[in-house]
Structure formats: structure tokens, C-alpha cells
Image: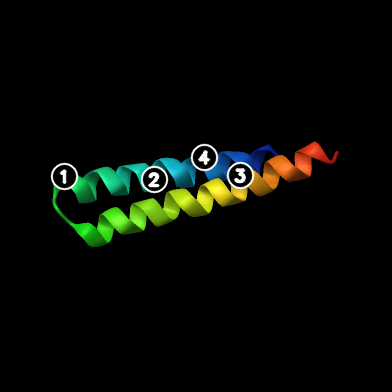
Amino acid sequence: MGLGDKIKNAAQEAKGKVKEGVGDATDNKSMEAEGLKDQAVANAKQAGENVKDAFK
């Protein structure tokens, strides 16, 4: 995959961090958990990209 996918993954991770922060600040555990989930998904996708790059 390309640079575009890496940018999307970084954006998803950033969005997750914002959600986590807002959820924590407003004591909204659901939003905080959703932010953590978004970050985990983005990190997993990024790890997959790194593996693909290693085999190129």
C-alpha cells in the first residue's frame, strides 16, 4: 500500500486521540473507549503496512 494509506492511518489515530481526550475531559466513557478503539485499529493497520514495506 502507499503513502495515502499511511496518511489515513495517522489521521485515524489522531482522531482517536481527540475522541479519547474529549471523552476523558467530559467523563464520557463510551467516547473515550471509542477513541482507544480507533487508535488500536489505526495502529494495527500501520503495523500491517510496515510488514508489507519490509518485504518489498
User: What residue would you read off at disc 2?
Assistant: 15
Q: Which mark is residue 46?
A: 3
Dot 2 amino acid type = Lys
Could you say where residue 33 lies in the image, as x and y percent from the top left? 31, 57
Label 4 Cα crowd, 10 Å radius (few <14 / some 14-19 / many 20+): some
Residue 54, quarter of picture: top right
- Which is more N-terminal, label 3 or label 2? 2
Mark 2: which secondary structure? helix
Q: Mark 1 sits on what residue?
A: 25
Which callout, 1 or 2, points at the residue further toward the start of the chain? 2
The residue that mark 4 highlights is 10
Residue occupying the point 55% across, 45% down? 9
Image coords of residue 42 (percent x, y)? 52, 49
Q: Type of residue at label 4?
A: Ala
Horizontal side of 10 relative to 15 (left or right) equals right
Asked which secondary structure carries label 3, the reply is: helix
6 left or right, relative to 36: right
